[in-house]
Amino acid sequence: MNNPRLYTIGSSLQIRDAKEILEQHMHKLSWGYGEKVLDIGCGPGTVTTSILQPLLPADATLVGCDLSEKMVAFASAMYGNETIKFRQMDVSKPNIWDEWEKEEFDKVFSFYCLNWIHNQRFGYVFIILVHAYLESH
């Protein structure tokens, strides 16, 4: 899907599920001052800004990323500000962090991202890479 407006119209399932999961599990997370949060597969930014961001501490910064340049441009134009940024990332690459300058994140979220990865074996590797990244930081 590379049409942000169409995706936004048809994303009620993603919004519902993300909200339900976050409501069930956010209280289990501990938060430090000024944490950086990454939302992988943010699409047009709807879930990132309307569901995830309101549940974060006020001093947290949030980065949403997506493979689609159109989704990232739409999200940046609609929702980008000093505490929410959007960037392009291809999670199907062996080292997903190569394209970015050195950045550290304290928490990583991802909703309905793995279904867009064509090589599902790499989807499993992707989860391991993110886990290893969080463990090392």
Image (cartoon, rainbow, N blue to C red):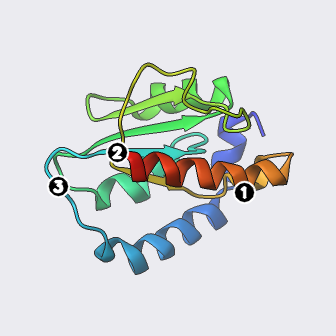
Disc 3 is placed on an element classified as: loop
The residue type indicated by label 1 comes to: Tyr
Q: Alpha-carbon neighbours of circle 1 within 10 Å: few (<14), some, or many (≥20)?
A: few
Disc 2 is placed on an element classified as: loop
Disc 1 is placed on an element classified as: helix
In 3D space, how far apart are the residues under numbered discs 3 and 1 (Cα atoms)?
A: 29 Å
Residue beneath label 3, please? Answer: 32
The residue type indicated by label 3 comes to: Gly
Q: Nearer the viewer, residue 50 or 110?
A: 110
Query: Looking at the picture, does residue 21 appear above or below residue 132?
Result: below
Q: Nearer the viewer, residue 91 or 47?
A: 91
In the image, which is nearer the foreground, mark 3 or mark 1? 1
In 3D space, how far apart are the residues under numbered discs 2 and 1 (Cα atoms)?
A: 21 Å
Picture coordinates of residue 43, whole percent (x, y): 61, 41
Which label was assigned to residue 101?
Answer: none
Q: Alpha-carbon neighbours of circle 3 within 10 Å: few (<14), some, or many (≥20)?
A: few
The residue type indicated by label 2 comes to: His
Tell whether 86 sits left or right of 27: right
Which label was assigned to residue 124?
Answer: 1
Residue at left offset 60%, top offset 44%: 41
Residue at left offset 86%, top offset 47%: 119
Picture coordinates of residue 127, whole percent (x, y): 62, 55
Dots 3, 1 in contact, CB < 8 A: no
Residue beneath label 2, please? Answer: 137
**Which comes before the other along the chain, label 3 or label 1?**
3
Residue at left offset 74%, top offset 52%: 123
Residue at left offset 60%, top offset 30%: 89
**Which comes before the other along the chain, label 2 or label 1?**
1
Q: Alpha-carbon neighbours of circle 2 within 10 Å: few (<14), some, or many (≥20)?
A: few
Picture coordinates of residue 38, whole percent (x, y): 43, 44
